[in-house]
Image (tube, rainbow, N blue to C red):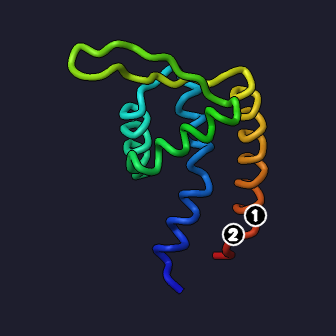
Amino acid sequence: MNVENTKAQMRKGVLEYCILSTLSQGELYPSDILAKLKEAKLIVVEGTLYPLLNRLKDAGLLTYRWEESRSGPPRKYYTLTPLGEKFLAELDQTWDELSLAVKKTTRRTR
């Protein structure tokens, strides 16, 4: 069994939650989202981010607006919808419960 594969799967499992949480801080351009995830040591590439953003948008959790750019094509800026904010609040609660359960089951006696 490959530990790197397991670690990658764990990261993928929380990626949507991290993206929604990042966007809860305000409207962002995808490269800004990538930078914030990178700061948190969650390395994500554009080829992973864009399909996720589209899926979250199609689910009604995100919306976007176009803004003209001085250097290049227009940019999409993403933000949470009211449904996305509600969904994120539910994920926050679930994360707290899951985190506590994992801590309880992985404690080692010293």
Q: Is 77 or 6 nearer to us in this picture?
A: 77
Q: x%, y% of residue 108?
A: 67, 74
Q: Is 82 or 92 nearer to us in this picture?
A: 82
Under mark 1, the amino acid is Lys
Badge 2, how many Cα within 10 Å: few under 14, some, many 20+? few
Under mark 2, the amino acid is Arg
Q: x%, y% of residue 84?
A: 69, 29
Q: How many marks?
A: 2
Q: Is residue 102 above or below residue 25?
A: below
Asked whether disc 2 touches disc 1, contact meaning CB atoms under 8 Å apart, the reply is: yes
Identify the element where label 2 is drawn. loop
Q: Is 50 or 85 nearer to us in this picture?
A: 50
- The residue at the point 77 percent across, 59 percent down is 101
List the residue tagged with mark 1.
104
Badge 1, how many Cα within 10 Å: few under 14, some, many 20+? few
Q: Quadrant of the C terminus?
A: bottom right
Q: x%, y% of residue 4?
A: 46, 74
List the residue tagged with mark 2.
107
